[in-house]
Image (cartoon, coloured by chain):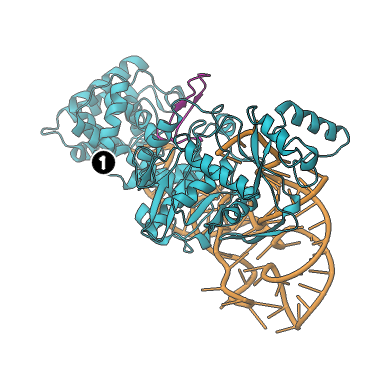
Chain colours: A cyan, B orange
Amino acid sequence: MEKVRVRFAPSPTGPLHIGGVRTALYNYLFAKQNHGACILRIEDTDRHRFVEGAEEYITESFKWLGITFDEGVHLGGKFAPYKQSERKEIYQQYIQQLIESGWAYYAFDTAEELEAKRKEYESEKKNFQYDMTTRYGMTNSLSLSEEEVKSRMDMPYVVRFKMPEDREIVIQDLIRGEVRILSNLLDDKVLYKSDGLPTYHLANIVDDHLMEITHVIRGEEWLPSAPLHVMLYEAFGWQAPQFAHLPLLLKPDGNGKLSKRDGDRLGFPVFPLDWQNPETGEFSKGYRENGYLPEAVLNFLALLGWNPGTTEELLSMDELIALFSIKRISKSDAKFDIEKARWFNHQYIQKKDNHELALIFEKMLVALSIQVALPKIEQAVALVKERLHLLTDFPEQSLFLFVTPEEYDTQVVKKKWKEDTPIHLTEIQKIITNITPFDKTVAHDAVMNYITSNELNTGQIMNCLRLSLVGAAKGPDLFEIVGFLGKEESCNRISRAITLLS
RNA sequence: GCCGCGUUCGUCUAGUCGGCCUAGGACGCCAGGUUUUCAUCCUGGAAAUCAGGGGUUCGAAUCCCCUACGCGGUACCA
C-alpha cells in the first residue's frame, strides 16, 4: 500500500470550479511527490442538486489540464465503486454500527417542525440548534420510549450524530496547526437522510477510511465541520487521516468567495471548460475556450496560496511536483488576479513549439472560413507569437497576413497619408516588382535607398506602406510582412490602397 | 448572534526558531530605451510606518494580550 493516499471528491452539482481545480492540483502534486495515489471520488449523495453531465465535465476538465488519477470513477481500483450513490449499502451498515454503539440516534422531526422551531427561536432573537440542550425536547429515539420509536420506524426518519458533551476537540491541521473547539457548541448533525442516503459527513468519513486515505487536503470551508469528522473517526474507532485546510480563492474586487457571477461580471472564466447548464441553458465560459494553455492555468493556480520559497515563478508540472510542500501553503485567502493569469499564459505561449501552435490556429482559421496551408500558418506563428497573450489572440493578430485589408485605420490615414504618398508608393511598388528573385532583405534595402536618396521622411513613408499592407499601424516588422505576403500580393495591396485612399 | 480561521506594496507573495528588513521578488501601473508602427523585450521608478493599540526585549513584521476588519461555518448542500 502506498504511504500517501489522497483524494479529490467533487460533487456533481455543476461545472468544476477553478478553486476546485486548485484543490485537486495540490492533492495531485502531493501524491506524485510522495509516490502515492490520487483518487477521484464522486460525492453525489444529494439527489436534488445533481446536474446531468457534471461528472463528465469534471473528467474532461482534468483530462485537459493533465491531472491524472490513479483510482476513481471511470478508472476503477481496488476500492471501487468510487461513486457514493453506488455505495448505499456500505453506509447503511456503518450507520447501524453508530446507532448500536450509542453514537447516533433516530430523529423523526419533520422539516416543517424544524422550520417552525427555528422561526420560534428567531422571534426571540435566538438561534435554534439541534444539540445537547435541545435534543431531549425533540422527537427522536432519545426522547421517545422504545415502543414509540418502533411505531415510527416505517415513517421517514433521519439519523443524527449524538455529539458528546464537555469535550475539547483538537484538530491537528497541517496548515493551521492546532484548532480547538468545545463539543458543547456543536450540533447533532444529520448523518443519514430520510431518502436513504448518507450526508457528506458520514459518507466522507466512511469512504476515506475504507479507501485508506492518509491526507485530507480540502478547502477551508470544511474546517468548521472538521471537529465532527474527528468525532466520527473516534466513534468508529478509526484513526483519522491528517488534515490540511486550504485557504480560499476570493473574488478579485471586494470580498467573498470567487463565484461564477464574478467571472461573468469581470469578464474572465471561472471554469476550466465551457459549460452549459442542461436545465437552465445558462452558459459559462471556460479557460480552454478562452485561449489559455492548461500548463499556464495550473502554474498560476499553484502559486495562488503556495510558493516554492524561491523567486522562480515559471514552474513546469514536474518542477511543481518536486517543489511542492504543504508547509509552504499560506494561511490567508488569495484574491484571484486574471491579469497575472494572462501573463503566465503569455509566457507559456512563448515556450510552445510553433508547429504545435500552428495546429491549434489552423482550426481557428478554418472556423473563420480561412484556408491556409499549415507551413504558412507556422510561418505566421513565428511572426506574431510574441504578441499573443491568449491563443485566441491569434486571428486578430494575424488576419492581415491571410486576408487583404478591407478597411484602413482612418486615424493613421489622416495623419500619415499625404498628397504625394501615391507617387512614392507607386515607385516603391516598382522597386519591389523588379527584385528577382524576391528577397525581403533586398526589398528593405532598396526601399530604404529610395527614401534616403529622395530625402523623404522614413516614418511617414513606411507607415503608409504598412497601412497599405496591414490596414493599420500595427503588426510585426514591415519587411517580414512583405516577405510573408510575397511580391505579388504586396504589390496588389499597394495598388489597392492607392486606389482606395487617393 | 454564536463558533472557527485569517490580516506584509492595488494583487500574489518572501520574510526558516526576534537583529543581515532603511521589508525582497512577481503581476499590474508609471517613465525611459529598443522597434520607421503596435505589441513584445530591456532599464529604471512609484508603491506596504508589516491592520490598529498595548506590552516583553538592548532590539519585533517576526513573541504575548486586546481591539478592529475580512473570510468561512452555523441545512435531511456538498
* Predominant SS along the magenta part: loop
Residue A287 is left or right of residue A201, and the answer is left
Asked if one can make out residue A106 in the rendered structure from this viewpoint, the answer is yes
Instruction: Residue type at mark 1: give it.
Output: Asn
Q: Nearer the viewer, residue A354 or A454?
A: A354
Residue A488 percent across, percent down from the top left:
18, 24
Q: Is residue A340 magenta?
A: no
Residue A404 percent across, percent down from the top left:
29, 21
Residue that numbered label 1 is attached to: A354
Image quarter (top left, top right, bottom left or bottom right) of the C terminus of chain A:
top left
Q: Residue at x 35, y 39 (%)?
A: A63
Question: Looking at the image, is A469 positioned above or below residue A243?
Answer: above
Residue B34 percent across, percent down from the top left:
38, 49
Q: Nearer the viewer, residue A217 or A77?
A: A77
Image quarter (top left, top right, bottom left or bottom right) of the N terminus of chain A:
bottom left
Q: Residue at x 38, y 42 (%)?
A: A80
Question: Looking at the image, is A461 positioned above or below residue A240?
Answer: above
Badge 1 marks a residue whose secondary structure is helix
Residue A73 percent across, percent down from the top left:
38, 39
Extreme-left residue of the structure: A437
Asked if one can make out residue A453 in the rendered structure from this viewpoint, the answer is no
Q: Residue at x 76, y 52 (%)?
A: A184
Extreme-right residue of the structure: A124
Q: Nearer the viewer, residue A149 or A478?
A: A149
Q: Is residue A279 magenta?
A: yes
Chain of the residue under label 1: A
Q: Residue at x 75, y 44 (%)?
A: A131
Q: Nearer the viewer, residue A57 or A170?
A: A170
Question: What stretch of residues is rendered in magenta?
Answer: A270-290
User: Exactly how many numbered labels are in the figure?
Assistant: 1
